[in-house]
Image: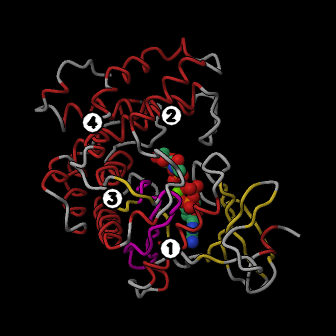
Amino acid sequence: MHTAGRFDLDSPAAEIKPYGSGHINETFLVTTRNNTRYILQKISPLLTDDAEGLMKNIRAITDYLRARISDPRGVMPLIPSKDGRSFIPEASGNWRMYGFIENSVCLLPPQDDVIFYKSALAFGRFVDMLSGFPADSLLETLPDFHNTPVRFEQLHRAIRADAAGRKASVTREIDFLLEREDEAGRLQRMRDSGELPVRVTHNDTKLDNILFDRDTMEPLCVIDLDTVMPGLVLYDFGDSIRSGATTAAEDERDLDKVSLDMRRYQLYQEGFAKACKNLTPLENELLPAGAWTITAEQAARFLADYLNGDPYYHTAYPEHNLVRCRTQIKLVSEMERLLLRKDKAFYGHPSY
Ligand code: ADP
Ligand code: GN1
Ligand code: MG
């Protein structure tokens, strides 16, 4: 029997086909004989081997949200296995099932300004709504996911190992990032010292992790909950800016096309602060630093994966991760020019 048949579907699966464009998990659209649709996912083994803990977090978060959101399409509907489990471990990996949120669309950035503003409201509301959720009851299933110093340590390790023999071709990118390593660790140090509050955050706030209503184009549901963990709200803000307030795709080859769209930046900031009502003055002040930090971190993650021979991110061609790293580096430069130029700490860095 196919894995899909082991879940509690309304009737047997009639069709199963690959779906979506995520970088990590494998996603399939399942249509049953009754024409009901479901989303089947194989959780990447590189994400975590604690699928039990991961699914426990997702169950707790979705139950909490369901008690507060009246729209049944507003929360990811987990479908248990026939024997009542939240995932099925198989030799091929750990599988889970969600109900398909019908009449919804998933939009890839860059989109228009109105959509982007609405995504700020949706992600801001998500953090705001979870502010009453006990953060320490969540398992840290992906330890150090946005611990930027650890991400740079992983880059150092990848450089030392040079497993794919690619180091010599990326010295410029390595130098650019390592010059910024110390500054990139600043927010994590402020988290460690207690200056910045730890909240329940989404940690992967790309536009394509929101489903919009196809008719009204209003945000319906925040999806991709694997990374919901205790974290800094600045990274949630920043990841949306990194991925959505940019003028080009994450894997654009022509760097002249890659810049920071300041109008988008301001719109997002406005929407996010409106929806996430209790940002502290320090958090408000550090929003630009959040955008810069996660973009530098993402560049380091793509570069480390490239140096390691691309084990983590799905790639379509051999230099895909390097191309992605370069767009992030260009954005880091643009952020230094447009967002942080008054901050002395960033003077003197060569631009890209
Ligand atoms: P990844 O971690 O690989 O990004 P996601 O959980 O974001 O995986 O899912 C991949 C894609 O599948 C999404 O971009 C979205 O288009 C679609 N998707 C996921 N869950 C649902 C759902 N419950 N209903 C409708 N579409 C969904
Ligand atoms: C991954 O799974 P997806 O495509 O939503 C990654 C994010 C990165 C992003 C870069 C679990 O997101 O952290 O920012 O790629 N997710 C995980 O596009 O590593
Ligand atoms: Mg996703």
* Mark 3 vs ligand 1: CB below 8 Å: no
Q: Nearer the viewer, mark 2 or mark 3?
A: 2
In reply to whether residue 203 is colored magenta, the answer given is yes
Cα separation between marks 1 and 2 = 31 Å
x then y, percent, for residue 323: 50, 31
The amino acid pointed to by label 1 is Ala
Crowding near pointer 3: few (<14 within 10 Å), some, many (20+)?
Answer: few
Name which quarter of the figure residue 88 lies in. Answer: bottom right
Q: Earlier in the sequence, mark 1 or mark 2?
A: 1
Q: Mark 2–mark 3 contact, CB under 8 Å?
A: no
| Residue under label 4 | 186
Q: CA distance from mark 2 to mark 3?
A: 27 Å
Secondary structure beneath dot 4 equals: helix
Q: Which residue is mark 1?
A: 60
Q: Looking at the rendering, in which quadrant would you find the N terminus?
A: bottom right
Name the residue located 36 percent from the left edge and 41 percent from the top edge: 294
Does residue 335 lie above or below 114 as drawn? above
Between the residue at mark 4 and the residue at mark 1, the CA separation in whole angstroms equals 31 Å
Q: Is residue 339 left or right of residue 19?
A: left
Magenta region: which residues? 202-227
**Residue at screen point 41% across, 53% down:** 109
Cβ(mark 2) to ligand 2 < 8 Å?
yes
Residue in the foreground of this view, choosing between 96 and 105: 96
Q: Please give the residue where the numbered disc 3 appears in the rendered image.
A: 112
Point 34% across, 54% down: residue = 236
Secondary structure state at the residue bearing disc 3: loop
Residue on which the image places disc 2: 302
